[in-house]
Amino acid sequence: MGKRPKKKIVLVLVEGQSDINALSYAIPQLYDEIDEEYEVFFPVLHDERQTCGDITSKYGVRPENIERLISKLFIDDFLKDYGLYPKDITEIIQIIDIDGVYIDDDCVLESKGGYNGKSTYYAADKIETADVASIVERNKRKRENLDHLSSLDRIKVGSKTIDYYAYYFSCNMDHMLHGDANIESFNKCRKADEFTDICIADDTFFSNFFCMDDGSATGMTYEESWQFIKESNHSLERHSNLNLLIERLKEE
């Protein structure tokens, strides 16, 4: 059993190792500046088939069961490892790649060429892929799950309901942080580490990056930021509402 954390526990749920590399220094620093009693953790999604991944696009995950599966695949093992209970968690944050899922189906186009060894390429106004039907189906499944999660302000874990916030990167984290939505898989963690190195060298960089960037949801409420990303081709463009986390914390 691990060391029992402090009292104010925040869980940050992300999609992969590169997300952890990019965010697991800066986000805990934000909370620490407000109250040193906060303890921020990044539980890893785990099931029989894989560790890490995007739960919102998984087969079999639907609005009716996604809250239960978030608890099962992200949180239950974490609680056991630390000897904790759902009531010990102060809030849950989920950071999600939008992946262009709100575009019209006719903007998903067939391409056999690939890009950097990938079968799917994200452009500013279209998705090119070797398997159109699969991407269209994924988009529908993920849209429904995102619509549900973005409507929540509390999420059920066990018998408790816990404050919940969903923040996004569009079209994905690499797009927002590095300006490239199609970075090769083997480069993702290296680029994430470079971003964190800058955050370590300059403790104002992370906040300034998101609060001043043209792609951030500046001047929007949480609800407005989600409405914005669902419109037109915004889910393919370079956007994030993570600035709203920073602004919320600064107000506390």
Image (cartoon, rainbow, N blue to C red):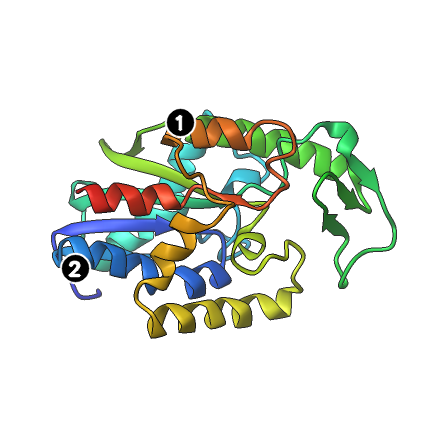
Quarter of the image where the C terminus is located: top left
Q: Quadrant of residue 164?
A: top left
Q: In the rendered structure, which amino acid carries the disc numbered 1?
A: Glu
Q: Quadrant of the N terminus?
A: bottom left
Residue 180 at x, y = what percent?
63, 57
Please tell me whether residue 136 is drawn above or below residue 55 in the rendered image. above
Please report whichever mark, 1 or 2, sits nearer to the chain's N-terminal start.
Answer: 2
**SS for dot 2:** loop
| Label placed on residue 223 | 1
Disc 2: which residue: 5
- Disc 1, disc 2: CB below 8 Å? no
Q: Residues within 10 Å of mark 2 (few under 14, many from 20)?
A: some
Residue 238 place in picture, x, y as percent: 58, 46
| Vertical position of residue 95 compared to residue 208: above or below | above
Q: Nearer the viewer, residue 124 or 9?
A: 124
Residue type at tag 2: Pro
Measured as percent of width and height from the top left, residue 211 is found at 38, 48
